[in-house]
């Protein structure tokens, strides 16, 4: 009798907690998804729906006009191709160089490697703003420690090209690369030493052990780094707007989007009126278009992503 | 491979020696980049901060002027102090909120319930979306403001942070600053949620490494879920609190008033010396904050081994 009552109390408690948990998770999900839903609803609205008091989420006059305008203002397909190329390139280079460095810091100890790893931690901790100006000047008059002027007579400017991104990512010093080295190091440290020793005993060299034994075991870490670096490069406005001013990639297009829309509106290029709300509507559509490829990608890889982070041992 | 080493005149390489050799080779790309794109700029940034820089047709003239750039940033420049305090106060306020919130959500997402996979993918969505330029543009959306006026849904956030609860707490004698902090937290909920994607991931990964035996044993001994959290989960993930604090701080670099100010001073006004001095003051301020938090947190952290 007493047991039954206790049991029912227990069940009540569990139900109540499920309810509270559902409320919390639903609410938080709503806060996260709200801007996206709102943007989608804005993007498919017609202009007259904007002021209609009865239209909140679902438009009365369904239209793709905003998409067309935003695509033409952003030069979308061209920009998309550029961005995919830039992000893909830096992602692969970063993963390779950070993977090598991470493995060396984890398993191939040499004299001074601890000190160098402290250098990696320093690159994580120093805000990029602190070194931005010297890097900018360095890239503007790039000499590679005085080697290039010997051939061409004068330093070359690497700005407005993809070279800054290629060079920094090939040398594992791109955006947040210190973090990736750290992730790889933690992961390789957690792979049992015996696996590696077995390979050595069977006669594999260091290179072969790394590519044949360690890398296939490190797929979760590789996926994590690939995803993070792709997404962060895609969204990065800090370095991109500094290095690339003329080239069209998503980040620069997005940050100049308000300006471009305003310009078009003034010139009457697309027969737009200078209604700030309407301009903002096109801007929202532009943002939606910029994040759309990422969201689509996320839907395909998210399961793998969540699982892989859980196994990467970022937690060490 | 052997002939390669033989060419160096070393017939007998020890295993350790070989590993060290390849270690250097593997680190080399990073090392070159570190010197070229980090250490040199880092040192010259410090040098710039101590000099006045004038650019003309021949190049740059760098003149040593001591600490006057620092003095100018702190006493003359009108926006520097404001931007610095704003970004630091912002950091100090939101870091604890983000860490507590993400720990809470990680514990929730670790429980079994219907639709967990969906909830997880929604909560990690901000990892993709809330970075860089998108977050900046989001704040300036007029349509959002308009819809928020129309739609009840848009007022959802304000309702939570509105006065009745605040008044009840004040009447109940809760300290006013605590009440303000809490209501401020509710107002920031959007910002907090959208910045805590990675932190939730880290905590979740940490919680999943805790062995289930601990929970089973505590349940046998009669511990409630609440006790299990404070006696097992919290101590076991406490090293990650430090990791998350550091991550949250470095994550805030990309979007604050300080970064914008340094960029405008450097690239719009071409005052490289002053911009470098600002960047160095900012860097030192962050180092001090990081040092204090690491000290405070690491005293409380529980390490298993």
Image (cartoon, coloured by chain):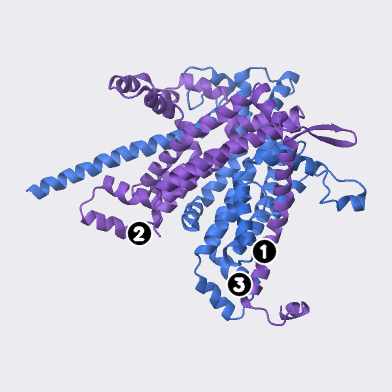
Chain colours: A blue, B purple
Residue underneath mark 3: A209
Marks 1, 2 in one chain: yes
Q: How dense is the environment of label 2, judged by Cα within 10 Å: few (below 14), some, or many (20 and up)? A: few
The kind of secondary structure element at disc 1 is helix
Residue underneath mark 2: B211
Residue reaching furthest front? B66
Of B284 and A277, nearer the camera is B284
Horizontal side of A148 relative to B181 (left or right) equals right
The kind of secondary structure element at disc 3 is helix
Q: Residue at horizontal 43%, vertical 42%? A: B102
Q: Residue at horizontal 50%, vertical 45%? A: B198
Q: Work out which quarter of the rendered image holds the N terminus of chain B and state it.
A: bottom right
CA–CA distance in space, label 1 to label 3: 13 Å
Residue reaching furthest bottom? B11
Q: Residue at horizontal 49%, vertical 69%? A: A192
Vertical position of residue B293 compared to residue A113: above or below: above
Q: Residue at horizontal 59%, vertical 34%? A: B255
Residue reaching furthest left? A1
CA–CA distance in space, label 1 to label 2: 36 Å
Q: How dense is the environment of label 3, judged by Cα within 10 Å: few (below 14), some, or many (20 and up)? A: some
Vertical position of residue B18 compared to residue B79: above or below: below
- Mark 1 — on which chain does it sit? B
Q: In the image, residue A209 lies at what x, y percent? A: 60, 72
Q: Quadrant of residue A263?
A: top right
Horizontal side of A27 relative to B15 (left or right) equals left
Residue underneath mark 1: B26
Q: In the image, residue A306 lies at what x, y percent? A: 48, 52
Q: In the image, residue A217 lies at what x, y percent? A: 54, 66
**Label 1 vs 2, first from the N-terminus:** 1
């Amino acid at each position: 009798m007493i047991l039954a009552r206790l049991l029912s109390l227990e069940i009540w408690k569990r139900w109540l907690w499920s309810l509270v948990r559902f409320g919390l998770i639903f609410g938080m999900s709503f806060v996260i998804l709200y801007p996206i839903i709102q943007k989608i609803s804005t993007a498919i609205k017609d202009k007259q729906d904007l002021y209609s008091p009865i239209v909140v989420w679902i438009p009365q006059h369904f239209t793709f006009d905003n998409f067309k305008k935003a695509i033409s203002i952003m030069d979308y397909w061209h920009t998309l191709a550029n961005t995919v190329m830039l992000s893909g390139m830096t992602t692969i280079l970063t993963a390779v160089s950070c993977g090598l460095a991470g493995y060396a810091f984890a398993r191939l100890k040499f004299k001074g490697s601890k000190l160098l790893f402290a250098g990696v931690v320093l690159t994580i901790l120093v805000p990029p703003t602190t070194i931005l100006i010297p890097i900018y000047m360095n890239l503007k008059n790039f000499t590679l420690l005085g080697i290039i002027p010997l051939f061409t007579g004068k330093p070359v400017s690497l700005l407005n090209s993809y070279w800054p991104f290629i060079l920094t990512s090939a040398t594992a010093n791109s955006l947040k690369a210190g973090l990736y080295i750290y992730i790889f190091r933690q992961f390789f440290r957690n792979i049992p030493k015996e696996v590696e020793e077995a390979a050595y005993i069977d006669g594999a060299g260091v290179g072969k052990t790394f590519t044949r034994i360690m890398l296939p075991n490190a797929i979760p870490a590789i996926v994590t780094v690939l995803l993070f670096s792709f997404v962060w490069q895609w969204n990065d406005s800090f370095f991109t707007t500094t290095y690339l001013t003329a080239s069209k990639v998503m980040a620069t297009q997005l940050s100049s989007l308000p300006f471009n829309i305003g310009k078009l509106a003034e010139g009457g290029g697309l027969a737009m009126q200078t209604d700030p709300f309407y301009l903002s509507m096109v801007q929202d559509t532009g943002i939606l278009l910029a994040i759309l490829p990422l969201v689509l990608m996320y839907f395909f890889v998210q399961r793998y992503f969540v699982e892989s982070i859980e196994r990467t041992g970022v937690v060490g | 491979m052997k002939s390669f080493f033989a060419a160096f005149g070393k017939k007998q390489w020890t295993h350790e020696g070989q590993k060290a050799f390849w270690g250097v080779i593997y680190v080399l790309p990073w090392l070159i980049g570190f010197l070229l794109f980090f250490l040199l700029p880092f040192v010259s940034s410090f040098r710039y901060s101590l000099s006045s820089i004038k650019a003309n047709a021949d190049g740059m003239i760098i003149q040593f002027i001591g600490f006057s750039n620092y003095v100018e940033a702190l006493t003359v420049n009108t926006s520097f102090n404001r931007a610095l305090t704003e970004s630091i106060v912002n950091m100090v306020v939101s870091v604890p909120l983000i860490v507590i919130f993400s720990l809470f959500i990680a514990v929730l997402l670790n429980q079994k319930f219907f639709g967990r996979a969906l909830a997880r993918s929604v909560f990690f969505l901000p990892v993709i979306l809330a970075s860089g330029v998108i977050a900046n543009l989001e704040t300036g959306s007029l349509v959002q403001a308009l819809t928020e006026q129309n739609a009840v849904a848009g007022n959802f956030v304000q309702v939570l942070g509105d006065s009745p609860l605040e008044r009840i707490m004040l009447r109940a004698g809760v300290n006013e600053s605590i009440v303000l902090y809490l209501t401020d937290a509710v107002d920031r909920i959007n910002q907090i949620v959208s910045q805590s994607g990675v932190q939730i991931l880290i905590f979740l990964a940490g919680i999943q490494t805790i062995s289930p035996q601990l929970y089973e044993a505590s349940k046998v001994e009669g511990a409630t879920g609440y006790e299990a959290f404070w006696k097992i989960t919290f101590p076991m993930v406490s090293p990650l609190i430090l990791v998350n604090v550091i991550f949250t701080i470095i994550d805030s670099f990309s979007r604050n008033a300080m970064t914008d100010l340094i960029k405008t001073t450097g690239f719009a006004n071409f005052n490289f010396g002053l911009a470098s001095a600002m960047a160095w003051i900012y860097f030192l301020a962050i180092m001090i904050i990081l040092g204090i938090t690491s000290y405070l947190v690491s005293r409380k952290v529980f390490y298993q081994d």
